[in-house]
Amino acid sequence: MARRNHLSDRRLYRHWSRDTVRFSDQDAGGHVNNVAVVAYFETGRLAFMHQALPRDAATARRFVAARIDVHYLSESHWPGDVEIGCGVLAVGNSSIRLGAGAFKDGACVAT
């Protein structure tokens, strides 16, 4: 994976998952709200961890998101699907740092 400022480049990601943009994800202005975008990233992170770790690994259930930084790049709207690209940015002694991008209708809406 590359540095954060490049996370909007879809070519960086080998792992992809999808989530549905729900009607209830909208705010009063008709935009997908910030909480929904974080939930899309959670879908991507958990799908990535499920695929990356052995199915029977006891550690698969011990990962905790200690920090989440989201950069909102453009508005998003219902209906549709969002594609979430995810990959490893860094590996520490007891942690990993993931990077992700959320894409709707071909555009990166958040990293």
Image (cartoon, rainbow, N blue to C red):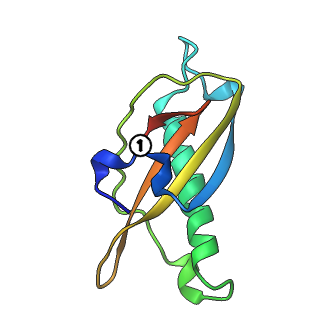
Horizontally, is 106 left or right of 89 in the view? right
Q: Which residue is mark 1?
A: 8
Residue 53 vs residue 9, the one in the foreground: 9
**In the rendered image of this protein, does residue 45 appear above or below residue 111?**
below
Q: Position of residue 54 (x, y in %)?
A: 63, 85
Q: Residue furthest front?
A: 11
Q: How many neighbours does mark 1 have within 10 angstroms: few (below 14), some (14-19), or many (20 or more)?
A: many
Horizontally, is 102 left or right of 92 in the view? right
Q: Position of residue 25 (x, y in %)?
A: 62, 29
Horizontally, is 36 left or right of 2 in the view? right
- Kind of residue at disc 1: Ser
Q: Position of residue 109 (x, y in %)?
A: 47, 33
Horizontally, is 15 left or right of 111 in the view? right
Q: Residue furthest top?
A: 29
Quarter holding the N terminus?
bottom left
| Residue under the image location 51 percent in, 38 percent down | 37
| Residue under the image location 38 percent in, 48 percent down | 7
Residue 45 vs residue 74, the one in the foreground: 74
| Residue under the image location 42 percent in, 63 percent down | 65
**In the rendered image of this protein, does residue 18 appear above or below residue 66?**
above
